[in-house]
Image: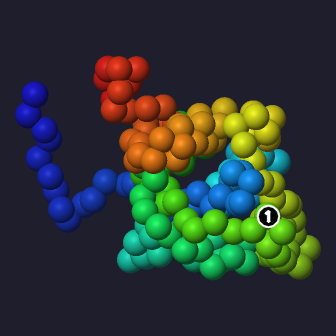
Amino acid sequence: MKPPPIDLSAAPACRIGGLAWIPNEHGEVLTVCANYGENAGFHQLPGGHAGGQQSNLAAMVTHVRYETGIDPAPIRLLGTDWVPHNTLTTVATGQNFIYLCGGVRSMAKIVLPAAVENAEPDFSGYLWQTPDTARSTMRPYQLRRFLGLWRAWKDGRTTVMHGGRPALSATAPEAL
């Protein structure tokens, strides 16, 4: 099947994001608890969407500094995760780039952003997690992503996911 023609004057809506995989000396990974949108009350990897002409890597660094007070040290791309359009929340399709960052000591000072006056803070806490602990703190799609990235991290490889599921394997969805 021939791909559709490309109209460079009207680019498709697609969010680009950068997330961080920050391990500690115990082999746990840093997550933050969001207080907004559909993620309220659940943990996720720190990072966020690019703004303006920002790259996914710059977005990761900016968001991690804001969300945790940590100055991340990216080492390599750990994985990508294509996120389909969410018809329930009208959130646009997205492509997240997840970077393996240099480790941080488990006792490092994590500084969550302060709340704006008369508003809930964006983040209410953080946890150092493993697959076992993440099962009770993450939404299902965040958990799928976490588990896929965990396997890639432990195997020393890079993973490509679609909606948190492996995209380049025998179990990849047939029609994307």
Task: Say if 107 sits above or below 5 in the image.
Answer: below
Residue 138 is situated, as x and y percent measured from the top left of the image, at 73, 40
| Pointer 1 residue | 106
Tell me the residue at 31%/54% (across/down): 12
Which residue type does callout 1 highlight? Answer: Ser
Looking at the rendered image, the quarter that the C terminus falls into is top left
Tell me the residue at 33%/32% (across/down): 168
Report which quarter residue 72 is drawn in. bottom right
Would you call the spot at circle 1 few (<14 residues within 10 Å), some (14-19), or many (20 or more)?
some
Left or right, residue 62 beside residue 24:
left
Left or right, residue 18 beside residue 3:
right
Looking at the rendered image, the quarter that the N terminus falls into is top left
Residue ranking furthest to the right: 118
143 and 36: which is toward the camera: 143
Residue ranking furthest to the left: 2
Q: How is the image coloured?
A: rainbow
152 and 51: which is toward the camera: 152
Residue 103 visible from this viewpoint: yes
Task: Say if 131 sits above or below 123 in the image.
Answer: above
Residue 56 is situated, as x and y percent measured from the top left of the image, at 43, 67
Residue 65 is situated, as x and y percent measured from the top left of the image, at 65, 77
Task: Say if 14 sits above or below 146 in the image.
Answer: below
87 and 2: which is toward the camera: 2
**What secondary structure is found at the residue carrying circle 1?**
loop
Left or right, residue 128 beside residue 60:
right
Residue 49 visible from this viewpoint: no
Residue 126 is situated, as x and y percent measured from the top left of the image, at 81, 59
Tell me the residue at 49%/36% (across/down): 163
Report which quarter residue 67 is drawn in. bottom right
Q: How many marks?
A: 1
Tell me the residue at 43%/32% (across/down): 166
